[in-house]
Amino acid sequence: ATATTFTRSAGSFVTDGFVTGQVVIAAGFATAGNNGRFRVTNVAAGTLTVTALDGQTMAIEAAGGNEIIISERATIKAGTTRKSYSIERIFDDQTGNKYHRYDGVEFSGLKISVTPDKIASVSLSTVGQGSSLGSAILSGATYQTAQTTTPMVAFNATIQEGGGAIASVTEISLTIENGHETRYVVGSTETLRPSIGRSKVSGQITVYFDDSTMLQKFIDETESSLSFELFDPVGNSYAFTIGKLKYTGGQPDVKGEGPITLSMPFQALYNSADATAIKVEVKPVVTP
């Protein structure tokens, strides 16, 4: 709209999480000066006011359909805003009602598993209200092509425990639960909106039992912290941080004459410094 703002015709910069002081990257504009890194100086629903950081000079330009504006780093925390979705599956080799729809779907849990010999995996659990079948795609929906990005693995991950690097971890598992409970009623095939509880973050790390340092933290009920970052081959990453936790167990597993491992389940605690029990930093690599 002007030489210092990006304007959108739909959606909201506020809802999408842009904040004052954030560094963003713009790409895809025909005018070279409208691409690159910018610092956000003001955020409104339809307008993002910025200052150029790479010495570029912005110019008024109409959108052509290929532009993107993405945060250089976004931080996600446990929140209280509830969102529900419609999910559609298609069995494309069938005829008739091949579209399977589920509405009122809320994501009730997330599990992450990281081991040295496998691709890092994430699974999501859901609670829905109802389901139906259809013979055509849901109005307004589109099906995206399968992604070709390379998944993240543990080989190049970084891990810190208690604020320091740790090199003996053999496995990390992390679970986030929103405490959804289905509410069935007499006389209806659909449920009421599910009830929710407190956000609960827990998990387990397994380490080689080289000494009693980790086990002592469980015995003494010492508060600790855990952070790990996963990378893909081009440098995109997710960084998971639990600023405060307590270990709820410590069991050295002896299985024959091989290395002894120590399983350490933990419970995350609310960390006032982060205003959450867990935060996830999304760090994309974007080339303007």
Image: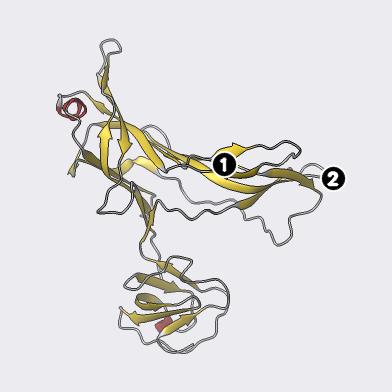
Residue holding disc 2: 96
Residue 187 percent location from the top left of the image: 76, 38
Most foreground residue, 70 or 195: 195
Task: Name the amino acid type tagged 2.
Answer: Gly
Most foreground residue, 90 or 85: 85
Task: Name the amino acid type tagged 1.
Answer: Thr
Most foreground residue, 130 or 255: 130
- Residue 49's place in the image compared with 247, above or below, is below
Residue 226 percent location from the top left of the image: 26, 41
- Residue 45's place in the image compared with 96, above or below, is below
Q: Residue visible at 41% across and 45% down?
A: 152
Q: Give the side of residue 260 with respect to residue 141, left or right.
A: left
- Tag 1: Cα neighbours inside 10 Å, few (<14), some, or many (≥20)? few
Q: Give the side of residue 146 with respect to residue 28, left or right.
A: right
- Residue 13's place in the image compared with 97, above or below, is below
Q: Residue visible at 83% across and 44% down?
A: 95
Q: Is residue 222 visible?
A: yes
Whole-Å distance between the Cαs marked 1 and 2? 27 Å
Say what secondary structure mark 2 lies in.
Answer: loop
Residue 156 percent location from the top left of the image: 31, 44
Q: Earlier in the sequence, mark 1 or mark 2?
A: 2
Q: Quadrant of residue 48?
A: bottom left
> Which mark identifies residue 126?
1
Q: Residue visible at 55% across and 71% down?
A: 11
Most foreground residue, 70 or 74: 74
Q: How is the image coloured?
A: secondary structure
Q: Give the side of residue 248 with respect to residue 110, left or right.
A: left
Please state the total of marks drawn on the protein image: 2
Q: Is residue 172 visible?
A: no
Question: For the residues carrying marks 1 and 2, which lies nearer the camera in this image?
Answer: 1
